[in-house]
Image (tube, helix red, strand yellow):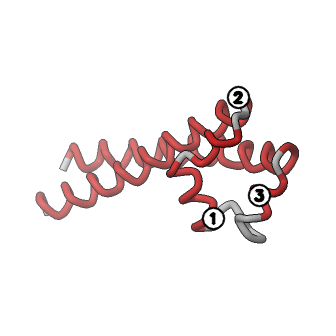
Amino acid sequence: MFLALVALAVAIAGAMAFLLFWPMTLVHLRDRHPAVLQGFGSFSFTSPTALSWLLRGGFRSLRDASLNGLAHPARIALIATLAALVVSGALWLIYH
């Protein structure tokens, strides 16, 4: 059960990092790459298209070092959050 709680803490930390870097990434896209941002729809913060673009690493194709510096930590945070939630849920099911 302890490991499930640790995984849940990692998920919370990842979510906080995601909430810091993802909005900055979207603002950078709005300012420098508006065509990409328009493809995400009206509310791009939780758009499945935008989140899959982030998970796939679609930002690399734009060759923008500043965007990479914002989007890469957001991607790592999103992956860590999702993985930690899966691990926490699995451990909770095993030990509960």
Q: Residue at x 57, y 37 (%)?
A: 72
Q: CA distance from mark 3 to mark 1?
A: 13 Å
> Element at badge 1?
loop
Q: Assess disc 2: are there few (<14), some (14-19) or many (≥20) residues with their C-alpha within 10 Å of its C-alpha.
A: few
* Mark 2 or 1, nearer chain start: 1
Tell me the kind of residue under disc 2: Ala
**Numbered badge on residue 37:** 3
Residue at numbered disc 2: 65
Residue 84 in the image, given as x and y percentages of width and height: 34, 49
Q: Is residue 72 left or right of residue 24?
A: left
Give whichever of discs 3 and 1 has the lower sequence position.
3
Q: Amino acid at mark 3?
A: Leu
Of 93 and 77, which appears nearest the observer? 77
61 relative to 8 in the view: left or right = right
Q: Amino acid at mark 1?
A: Thr
- Callout 1: few (<14), some (14-19), or many (20+) C-alpha neighbours within 10 Å? few
Q: Cα distance, mark 3 to mark 2?
A: 17 Å
Give the labeled residue for mark 1.
46
Residue 19, horizontal then vertical, whole percent: 62, 48
Residue at x 65%, y 41% (from the top left corner):
21
Which secondary structure lies at badge 3? helix
Depth order, front residue of 75/8 = 75
